[in-house]
Image: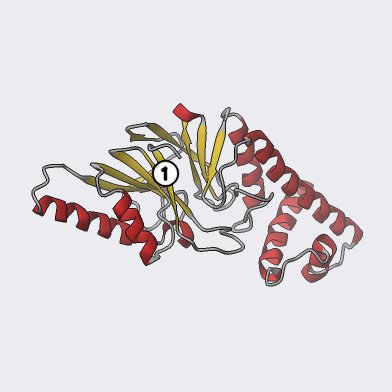
Amino acid sequence: MRDHLRFLNAGNVGPFTLDGTRTYLVGTKSVAMIDPGPDVGDHVRALAMAVESVTELKILLTHGHPDHAAAVGSVAQAVTRHAAERASAGSSDRFSMSVWGPKGVAGVDHVLADGDLVVTDVGSLIALHTPGHTREHLCFHWERQDALFVGDLLLGEGDTTWVAEYEGCVADYLDSLARLRSLGLKLIYPAHGAPLEDPTNALDRFESHRRERIAQVAAALADHPGADAARLLEVVYGDTLPKGMRAPALQSLGALLEYVRSVVEH
């Protein structure tokens, strides 16, 4: 990546995190650190070292899940300690740090609303409220680069992300995808997986998957009106569920059922 955009990977590999959480650093001296990630010692130390020469640090959170936000306190402490050490060694550089993110997320001291700007020395990041993965989820639009830091709204591979956390999440998710289409993006940076270099294709892929699941759930309900959740799970997913994913799939099915029934009622 260019000098004004870097990422460090926390290495927390898993079925939902892929190769781990990517913490993005945007800027050179006035820097935005997007999603410090899980509270993993090596990752925290690497982040603190990566920003030890900056004069202004704004830590941005897309949402409150631990794999994105748990390290915020440890990173803040480490960065503050490094700044104090530089000052005691005679450095005249002034340093400031703040934590920005959605309302209700722990550690945030600057609450971001839709449309708010976060200034760096390589352009502003525009906060976009994009619920679906979580109710409070934000993306950050780097307008100067026609790029988007998308958090967990999209992943860097595959065609699905976690959308099952709250009532109305599926409808919100589809609305958020539609909003992203209007931005004219050239590049999307997910928190998990490689950058998406064809944003239109990625948005099509993730939306198509969700709408196919919706159609499958609607058909299963029509064909098996008295079926319980376990039976509907079997009808919709068949034998495609990876080992250990039954509980998350049931929760996802519940969100899809809520969406289908809300559409039918209206």
Taking depth in this image into account, of 166 and 125 the one nearest to the observer is 125
Report the number of numbered marks: 1
Question: Is residue 183 at least partly visible in the picture?
Answer: yes
| Residue type highlighted by circle 1 | Arg
Task: In this rendered view, identify the residue nearer to me: 79 or 259.
Answer: 79
Residue 113, x across and y down, in percent:
42, 40
Left/right placement of residue 182 relative to residue 149 reads: right
- Which colour style is shown? secondary structure
Work out which residue is located at the far right of the displayed protein and give it.
Answer: 223
Helix, strand or loop for disc 1: strand
Residue 39: x and y in percent read 39, 64
Q: Is residue 168 visible?
A: no
Q: Residue sitting at 68 percent across and 68 percent down?
A: 245
Q: Which residue is mark 1?
A: 6
Q: Vertical placement of 107 versus 54: above or below? A: below
Of the 4 image quadrants, the one containing the C terminus is: top right
User: Residue 81 appears in which quarter of the rendering?
Assistant: bottom left
* Vertical arrangement, residue 37 with respect to residue 137, above or below: below
Residue at x 79%, y 48% (from the top left corner): 212
What is the x, y in percent for residue 244? 68, 72
Looking at the image, which residue is at 23% across and 41% down? 55
> 89 or 181, which lies in front?
89
On the image, the x and y values in percent for residue 219 come to: 87, 54
Label 1 Cα crowd, 10 Å radius (few <14 / some 14-19 / many 20+) = some
Which of the 4 image quarters holds residue 43?
A: bottom left
Closest to the observer, 31 or 136 = 31
**Residue at (86%, 66%) from the top-left corner?**
226
